[in-house]
Image (cartoon, rainbow, N blue to C red):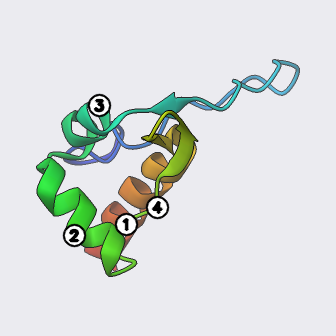
Amino acid sequence: MMAGNAEIACPPPQHPHQTPRPERFIRVGEVSSMVGLGKTTIYKYVSTNAFPAPVAIGGNRVAWLESEVLNWMRERVAARQS
């Protein structure tokens, strides 16, 4: 069993014969809830390449790839454990 919240940042392993989960766009409010950062901080981190950049999805709207946000979270956990 892992200590702390390390398990939360990593989705459960998929069965080898299971179809991979499709990629999903998530908006800034959901990103903020997932990572515990405010919207302003997220955009500041994006501007310094410290956080994944959003993708234009049309109509002057942007979203993040869920997988990239989850990977960023995993990297934070790994950095803490190093």
State how far apart marks 2 and 1 are (Cα): 9 Å
Assign the N terminus to one quadrant of the image: top left
Note whether residue 81 is visible. Answer: no
Q: Nearer the viewer, residue 75 or 62?
A: 62
In the rendered view, would you say 70 is above or below 52?
above
The kind of residue on which mark 3 rests is Glu
| SS assignment at label 3 | helix
Graded by Cα atoms within 10 Å as few (under 14), some (14 to 19) or many (20 or more), the crowding at tag 3 reads some
Image depth: mark 1 or mark 4 in front: 4
Q: Position of residue 6 (x, y in %)?
A: 31, 48
Per the model, the C-alpha gap separating discs 3 and 2 is 17 Å
The residue that mark 3 highlights is 30
Q: Amino acid at mark 4?
A: Ala
Label 3, label 4: how far apart the Cα atoms are: 15 Å
Amino acid carrying mark 2 in the image: Lys
Nearer the viewer's eye, disc 3 or disc 2? 2
The mark that comes first in sequence, 2 or 4, is 2
Task: Please tell me which of labels 3 and 4 falls first in the chain.
Answer: 3
- The residue at which mark 1 appears reads as 51
